[in-house]
Amino acid sequence: MKQSLKKDRMFLSTIDYVASNEQFNLFLDNKTNIVWTDVAEDHNHNIYYKNENYLPHNEKKGLFAFFYKLSQNIMFSYKLKVLKKILQPSNIILDYGSGDGHFGEFMKKQEINVQMYDPIVNKSKNSQVFDNQYDMIMMWHVLEHIPDINKTIIALEKKLKHNGALVVAVPNRDSFDSKAYRKHWAAWDVPRHLYHFNHNSLENLMKEKGFKLISKHPLWLDSYYVSYLSSKYKKSFFPWINALAIGSLSNILALFTSKYSSSFYIFRRA
């Protein structure tokens, strides 16, 4: 990971609330408008995923886990409904960074041809990824985890067929919940999240790599999930109430600004 450059200015300082309580600095790249997490070059990134508090890849019990799973299933149906508008029965899809594989399995139950590959948590279910093979590649909250985003996007572009689609979901650092919680915002998720986007920085990055934005879709339940975690990190007395208030306000304001807590973008090869 690159170290702080003179052209980049200090953006925020926050800590790893999930695993280590270490402090990390975030810097704004003035050229790309992408915020990046400053970590040492000898930093062992994988150790920060191997923690029982890291919910996305660990099974938990309790009320929070119940609502997490319920909202996850709701969003699975929503995402698939959107994707089906551009999918054909013969399409081949790659879920890149598939994590626990639950969304891929959900799609398979709908008789959709999806393959799963996760280079981050080493749960690869497809050992070879050939060029010009896929009609769609999905990256659900993956891009922000990848050390070399430029190299990865270029490599994935080669895996797509002509006019293939790339689906990218990321948190939005310009959302209201981000502004409300500041350094306690759970979607900073340092140092697992190495990059932090807003709408313009992501679209410009993808345009530079040969992709055209087709559509953008809010992940409106993410604001509640992120706000709940953020409230806990902030040590709020009533995190559920706080999460409902901030999450709802974030979604309402986003109706006018489009700055949802998280969104997914559908790009096509230009």
Image (spheres, grey):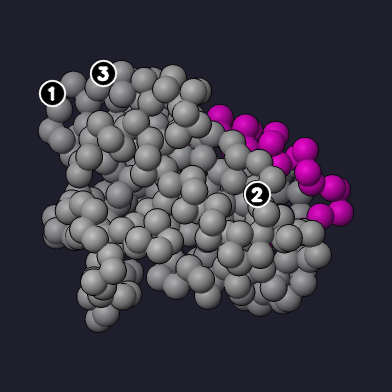
Residue 225 visible in this rendered orientation of the protein: no
Mark positioned earlier in the residue sequence (2 or 3): 2
Mark positioned earlier in the residue sequence (1 or 2): 2
* In the depicted structure, whether residue 43 falls above or below residue 96: below
- Structural crowding at the residue carrying mark 1, measured as other residues with C-alpha within 10 Å and reported as few (<14), some (14–19) or many (≥20): few
Tag 3: amino acid: Ile
- Is residue 77 located in the magenta-colored stretch of the structure? yes
Instruction: Identify the image quadrant of residue 134.
Output: bottom right
* C-alpha distance separating marks 2 and 3: 36 Å
Q: Are marks 1 and 2 in contact (CB under 8 Å)?
A: no
Q: Which mark is residue 237?
A: 1
Q: Are marks 3 and 1 in contact (CB under 8 Å)?
A: no
According to the picture, the residue beneath numbered tag 3 turns out to be: 241
x 60%, y 40%: residue: 216
According to the picture, the residue beneath numbered tag 2 turns out to be: 213
* C-alpha distance separating marks 3 and 1: 9 Å
- Structural crowding at the residue carrying mark 3, measured as other residues with C-alpha within 10 Å and reported as few (<14), some (14–19) or many (≥20): some
Of 71 and 193, nearer the camera is 193
Tag 2: amino acid: Leu
Q: Secondary structure at mark 2?
A: strand
* C-alpha distance separating marks 1 and 2: 42 Å
Measuring from the top left, give residue 37's x and y in whole percent.
Answer: 28, 62
Task: Identify the magenta region.
Answer: 71-95
Measuring from the top left, give residue 14's x and y in whole percent.
Answer: 18, 51
